[in-house]
Image (cartoon, helix red, strand yellow):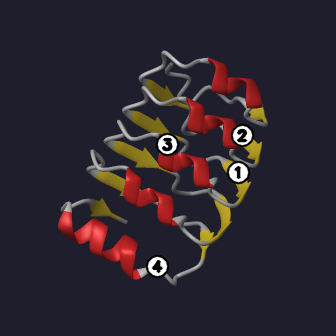
Amino acid sequence: LNLYNNQLSGSIPSEIGQLTNLTELLLGRNKLSGSIPSKIGQLTNLTELNLYNNQLSGEIPHEIGNLTKLTFLSLSYNKLTGYVPNEIVNLTNLKHLWLHNNNLSRNISKEINDFVRANRIHFN
């Protein structure tokens, strides 16, 4: 589902979790606000999740660790806070992890650091 750069506003509805056949969810460069719904963790066929450059806030949901087919995850340029959840290490197919330009804690767990290095993930 490619809705990149469409001036969408409002929040991402929790019903997004019902679209279980999606392989790509591209919602970057919109004006989406609110938190990333935990139901996003039900999209287990996703290979690409791009929520880049919105106004999303709150924490990265732990359920993101359910998206084990992801190769690309971009949450950059939002207003996300808190820690990067350790469940990120479940994303063993991940090649690109972009989290920059948020208000995330700079304290990344050793487990995540080791995961990023071991899998040669482009981590920004």
SS at mark 2?
Answer: strand
The answer to whether the residues at label 2 and label 1 have Cβ atoms under 8 Å apart is: yes
Task: Give the number of the disc on residue 32.
Answer: 2
The correct choice, above or below, for 93 with respect to 101 in the image is: above
The answer to whether the residues at label 4 and label 2 have Cβ atoms under 8 Å apart is: no
- The answer to which image quadrant residue 112 occupies is bottom left
User: Which quadrant, please, contains the C terminus?
Assistant: bottom left
Direction from residue 52 to residue 92 in the image, left or right: left
Nearer to us of marks 4 and 1 is 4
- The answer for how far apart the CA atoms under marks 3 and 4 are is 20 Å
The residue under the point 51% across, 84% down is: 107
Task: Give how far across and how far down residue 30 sits, in percent.
Answer: 64, 37
Nearer to us of marks 3 and 2 is 3
Direction from residue 108 to residue 7 in the image, left or right: right
The residue under the point 43% across, 30% down is: 46
Task: Give the number of the disc on residue 66.
Answer: 3
The residue under the point 68% across, 30% down is: 7
Q: Amino acid at mark 2?
A: Leu
- The answer for how far apart the CA atoms under marks 3 and 1 are is 23 Å
Sequence order check, earlier mark of 3 and 2: 2
Using the image as rendered, state which of residue 102 and residue 90 is in the foreground. Answer: 90
Q: Amino acid at mark 4?
A: Ile
The residue under the point 27% across, 45% down is: 93
> What residue sits right under mark 4 in the picture?
108
Q: Amino acid at mark 1?
A: Gln
Task: Give how far across and how far down residue 57 sits, in percent.
Answer: 73, 57
Sequence order check, earlier mark of 4 and 1: 1
Task: Give the number of the disc on residue 55.
Answer: 1
